[in-house]
Image: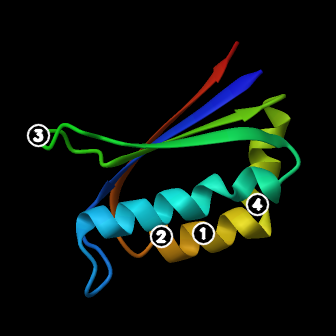
Amino acid sequence: MIRHIVLFGFESYPSGQSKEQFLKEAKAAFEELPQHIDCLKSLKVSFNINPNESYDLMLEGVLSSADEIEIYAKHPEHVARVKQYIKPFVSKRACVDIEE
C-alpha cells in the first residue's frame, strides 16, 4: 500500500471567497475523487488548524502500488480539480509517498 501525502500552502483565494470557504469547497471536490478514479482506494483531505504554519491543506491518498501514483496524477478528474483549486492559488507544495 502507498500513502501519497501532499501539503499545499495558498497565497490567494478566489475573489469573494474567504479562506475557510475555499478550503471547504476544495476539500469536498477532492474527496469525490475515489468515486471516479479506480486506483485511488481512499482520499482524506484535512485543514491545518495552526495558523502559524505555512501549509493550509493536506491530501492523503491511498493506492495499491507506486505505479498507480502516475495514473492518479494524470487522471482527468484529478487534473480538473488541480486546475481549478490548486494551480491558480498555491504558493508552495510538499509531497511524500510512503510504502507500507
Residue for point 77% across, 70% down: 76
Residue for point 68% across, 58% down: 32
Q: What residue type is disc 1 on? A: Arg
First in sequence: mark 4 or mark 3? 3
**Residues at circles 2 and 4 in contact by the CB criterion of under 8 Å:** no
Report, in whole angstroms, how far the alpha carbon at label 2 lies from the one at label 1. 6 Å
Q: Which residue is mark 2?
A: 85
**Mark 3 Cα within 10 Å, few/some/many (few <14, many 20+)?**
few
Closer-to-camera residue (9/43): 43
First in sequence: mark 4 or mark 1? 4
Report, in whole angstroms, how far the alpha carbon at label 2 lies from the one at label 4. 16 Å
Q: Is residue 6 left or right of residue 66?
A: left
**Mark 2 Cα within 10 Å, few/some/many (few <14, many 20+)?**
many
Q: What residue type is disc 4 on? A: Lys
User: Within the image, what quadrant is residue 19 found in?
Assistant: bottom left
Report, in whole angstroms, how far the alpha carbon at label 4 lies from the one at label 3. 33 Å
Q: Which residue is mark 4?
A: 74
Which SS class for mark 1?
helix
| Residue 79, image x, y percentages | 67, 68
Q: Nearer the viewer, mark 4 or mark 1?
A: 1
Q: Which residue is mark 3?
A: 52
Closer-to-camera residue (15/95): 15
Q: Which residue is mark 1?
A: 81
**Mark 4 Cα within 10 Å, few/some/many (few <14, many 20+)?**
few
Q: Nearer the viewer, mark 4 or mark 3?
A: 3
Q: What residue type is disc 3 on? A: Asn
Report, in whole angstroms, how far the alpha carbon at label 2 lies from the one at label 3. 22 Å
